[in-house]
Structure formats: structure tokens, C-alpha cells
Image: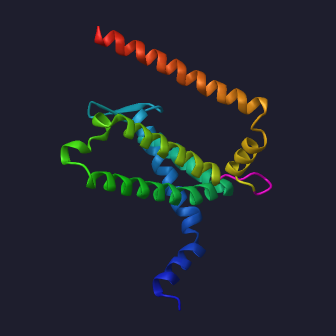
């Protein structure tokens, strides 16, 4: 049995709300906010105050949003990835709630009091978002970029490219660790 709300969602889907209107509004809003904040397209004086040029910012945002919704692959990527990013956010919030259950109020400041947990959480979320977007972008054969990347890593594990990337990661971490130690020693002196 189809509910009235289910029928309304189907009507909106057939109308193009999820494939045209919502992606357009999302891209327009994000681009407009970035242009307003950065003032890349200049400012105008209104009553002695420098304010962003809303006319140019809105026109550029409008054009970018229209070009975005005209590209079906980009809209599909947005529609597939954003619900998964929200799911990752809910998982992260649930984790923080569980951590908060076992801590006192003043201990919940993960950023300053539990730096290791905080950095692990940030890295996990960053890798999760990258994986979500890689999984929602497809090549011409219908394979997601995440599938292609995992296939390449598993089949070329002993290859020169993967070995070089791993070596580069180890070198960057080693350089970071060495320079971090030197900064701490200078601050202690």
C-alpha cells in the first residue's frame, strides 16, 4: 500500500526535484557563499560600506549551478554521495555520544585533552568522505573509482607505483615526525 507521503515523494522525483532543483539550489548556495565570503569578484560601496558585488556573485553562481545540473554524471555523484556523507556524520555523532557517556563534562574536549583520539577521528572521517566520493564516481564501463583503485592496489601490490607511493608516505611521516620533535625541543628550551 502506497502512502500519501510516498506518492508525494514519487511526484517530486518525477517532477525532477531531486535531479534538478535540489542539486541546483545546493550548488548555487555553496558557490554564492564562497563568492560572498572571498569577494573574488569585487566589492561595491553602499552607504560608505564595502560589500560584495551581489549581482556578479549571483550571476556566476547561477551559471555554475545550471552547468552542474546539465551534467548528469555530476548530479548522480551528488545524489549518491551526500546521503552517505550524512550517514558518516551520524556515525561520527553516535561515536561522540558513546565517548561522552564515559567521560566527565570537562573531559569531553577531545581537541585539546585527547589529541590522539581527535586526530584519529579526523583522519577516519576524511578517509570516509574520500571513499564515499570515489565510490560514487563512475568510469565509462560503470565501475566506481573506488573499485578501480582497490583493484589496482590488490593486483599491483608489489608493483613499482604502489611501492613508490608507500615509500613516499613513509618519508613524509618520517619528516613530519622529525620536524615535530625539533619544534617540541625548541619550545622546551
Q: Position of residue 89 (x, y in %)?
A: 43, 54
In the rendered image, which quarter contains the C terminus?
top left
Q: Position of residue 72 (x, y in %)?
A: 67, 58
Quarter of the image where one finds residue 42: top left
Residues drawn in magenta: 137-142
Q: Which of 56/147 is in front?
A: 147
Tell me if residue 114 is in the magenta stretch: no
Q: Position of residue 120 (x, y in %)?
A: 44, 40
Vertical arrangement, residue 142 with respect to residue 44, above or below: below
6 displayed left or right of 102: right
29 displayed left or right of 131: left
Q: Residue at x 59, y 48 (%)?
A: 131
Q: Residue at x 42, y 33 (%)?
A: 38
Q: Which of 4/187 is in front?
A: 187
Vertical arrangement, residue 112 with respect to residue 146, above or below: above
Q: Residue at x 50, y 50 (%)?
A: 28
Amino acid at each position: 500500500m502506497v502512502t500519501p507521503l510516498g506518492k508525494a515523494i514519487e511526484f517530486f522525483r518525477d517532477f525532477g526535484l531531486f535531479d534538478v532543483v535540489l542539486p541546483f539550489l545546493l550548488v548555487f548556495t555553496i558557490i554564492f557563499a564562497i563568492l560572498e565570503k572571498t569577494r573574488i569578484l569585487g566589492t561595491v560601496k553602499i552607504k560608505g560600506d564595502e560589500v560584495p558585488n551581489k549581482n556578479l556573485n549571483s550571476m556566476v553562481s547561477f551559471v555554475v549551478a545550471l552547468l552542474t545540473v546539465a551534467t548528469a554524471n555530476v548530479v548522480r555523484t551528488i545524489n549518491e554521495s551526500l546521503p552517505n556523507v550524512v550517514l558518516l556524520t551520524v556515525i561520527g555523532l553516535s561515536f561522540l555520544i558513546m565517548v561522552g557517556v564515559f567521560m566527565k563534562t570537562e573531559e569531553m574536549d577531545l581537541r585539546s585533552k585527547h589529541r590522539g583520539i581527535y586526530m584519529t577521528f579526523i583522519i577516519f572521517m576524511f578517509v570516509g568522505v574520500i571513499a564515499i566520493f570515489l565510490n560514487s564516481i563512475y568510469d565509462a564501463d560503470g565501475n566506481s573509482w573506488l573499485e578501480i583503485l582497490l583493484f589496482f592496489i590488490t593486483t599491483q601490490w608489489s608493483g613499482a607505483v604502489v611501492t613508490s607511493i608507500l615509500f613516499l608516505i613513509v618519508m613524509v611521516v618520517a619528516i613530519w615526525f622529525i620536524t615535530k620533535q625539533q619544534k617540541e625541543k625548541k619550545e622546551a628550551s
